[in-house]
Image (tube, grey):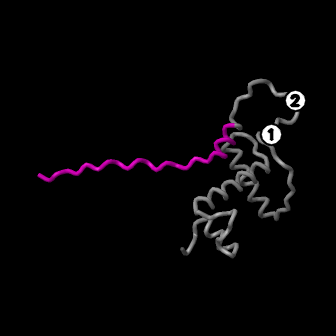
Amino acid sequence: MARESKKTPEPPKKKPQFAWALLHETKTNQPATSPLPAGRPPRLSPARKSTVHLTSGDEEAIHLWQNVFSEVLGKKVSLGETFGLLARICQERAAMLDLSLNDYHGPDRLVDLIQKLVGESDE
């Protein structure tokens, strides 16, 4: 009779936790403790005003992501929040690839950097 080997099941891979995303969701989903005064709602976090110039294609892509984030969070997401979330996502992806942004020594061409970030690399 053959002896059965007992394999211990591998524990499921733990998904990385992104503190900034959890904080954003928590602040967004907090129930109001008291009625808010009329007017513009308070900001979720301190922010600075910035101006950007976008091509129509860039603007379309930003609005698509804005709609996705609004759907996921169940509330209207501002353009500033959309830019912030996309910037954080890129920053996390770079960290996963051990790509230092403070002391950059990565690809010299934009197309090569994009390929590395999206996972299409010859390496």
Position above or below: 105 against 34: below
Q: Position of residue 32 (x, y in %)?
A: 74, 28
Seen from the viewer's position, the closer of residues 78 and 117 is 117
**Residue named by callout 1:** 43
State the residue at coordinates (77%, 62%). 58
State the residue at coordinates (79%, 47%). 78
Quarter of the C terminus within the rendering:
bottom right
Q: Amino acid at mark 1?
A: Arg
N-terminal of the two: label 1 or label 2?
2
Q: Position of residue 31 (x, y in %)?
A: 70, 29
Q: Position of residue 108 (x, y in %)?
A: 68, 75
Q: Is residue 4 magenta?
A: yes
**Residue named by callout 2:** 38
**Magenta segment, prevailing SS (helix, strand or loop):** loop
Position above or below: 110 against 88: below
Disc number lying in front (1 or 2): 1
| Residue 100 falls left or right of residue 13 | right
Where does the magenta region start and end? 1-26
- Distance CA(mark 1)–CA(mark 2): 14 Å
Q: Is residue 69 magenta?
A: no
Position above or below: 107 against 25: below
